[in-house]
Amino acid sequence: MIKTKNAQRSVRCARSLTFVLIVTLLSLTSTLRVPNFGKNRVGSSLVTGVVRSKSPELSTRSQATNWNTIKVYVGPRNEQNDSWRSFSQVQQDEVIRTLFPDTRGYFVDLAANHYSTLSNTYALETYDGWDGICVEPNEMYWPGYINRRCTLIAAVVGESDENVTFKKSNGEFGGVISPQFDNSAGEGVSHYTVTIREILYMQRAPKTIHYFSLDVEGAESIVFAHIPFDAYTIYSMTIERPRQDVLKSLSQYGFVEVGILGDFGDTMYLSRRTPQFLSRLKAAQIKVTQLTKERYKDHLMKEELRMEIGSFRVNDVTVGVRCPYTKINDCELQNWLETS
């Protein structure tokens, strides 16, 4: 288990954080904009950052009634003095750092869960100066985000204004309850959903997003269908266990597979539109192979440990790099369980 940062060290942040949250969270000293949701309707969202103007892509109704804002002042931020280290479950952040060295990039982290433990973006933000959007609908995680610079969006992402049941009792494995998702049954809380397109427009996200982390417990296809690739350039993505419809769309949008990180299907992709695409892909695949060998060294043979770029069979699944950069034009995107 990764240890979390000392909250005392980062509670003094250099700026105000703003949360757009469910109306019931009123315990913080704040300025809260409470909209009229209508009878029996509960707002589903909480945002860091004030919505300053209406986007032409969004309706006046959506802008005026569906978002609440609360500002939390947390004081000046201390400089981070310790050495860089990964906080991701299988070093996704370390590979992204290899892809974009010396870059203060922009990320979308969906779903973000705990502010630091197993976070794909905490190290990038804390040590390398990245910024972005952290989407997390479970209020048990919200207080920790006073330690973050990212914009916290408390929303269930999916279709537009669909009433769903969201399971929160199982923490980082929580999600929308549906027979086709990881949370196929159980009790949850009623939420209205919002599309990722609306979130990006509302937050005036930059047109270039360096990294999009997508892990929503089986609902990846629904979220992915609403990513506005027509309006934003996304350089890299990690997606847990992407289904065939997602792989088809990734291929159409010009993404290639960097590698599989870990034996649970978290797969990284890189867009051909990324500057210095081939050299970045090579560096990332070398890093993925290195990290994979370190993680599974007890399962590998000596000749495998000498490979610079390659894939390995571990726990009956393939991990590492299935399609090296030298053959990238000959490879099709495949299900994470396929061997080649």
Image (tube, grey):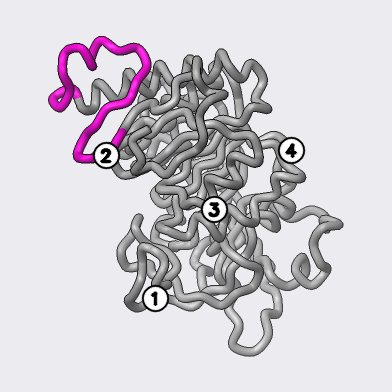
Mark whose residue sits in front, 2 or 1: 2
Q: Residue furthest right?
A: 56
Element at label 1: loop
Q: Mark 3–mark 2 contact, CB under 8 Å?
A: no
**3 or 274: nearer the eye?**
274
Kindly identify which residue carries mark 4: 207
**Can residue 29 be seen in this snapshot?**
no
| Figure check: 58 above or below 265 | below
Q: Magenta region: which residues?
A: 297-318
Q: Amino acid at mark 3?
A: Asp
Kindly identify which residue carries mark 3: 245
Q: Position of residue 178 (x, y in %)?
A: 42, 72
Q: Looking at the rendering, which quadrant does residue 29 occupy? A: bottom right
| Figure check: 200 above or below 129 | below
Task: Using residue 156 as the reference point, say whether residue 306 is left or right of it.
Answer: left
Kindly identify which residue carries mark 1: 188
Q: Looking at the rendering, which quadrant does residue 1 occupy? A: top left
Q: Earlier in the sequence, mark 2 or mark 1?
A: 1
Q: Residue drawn at (42%, 58%), measured in percent from left and top? A: 218
Q: Mark 4–mark 1 contact, CB under 8 Å?
A: no
Kindly identify which residue carries mark 2: 317
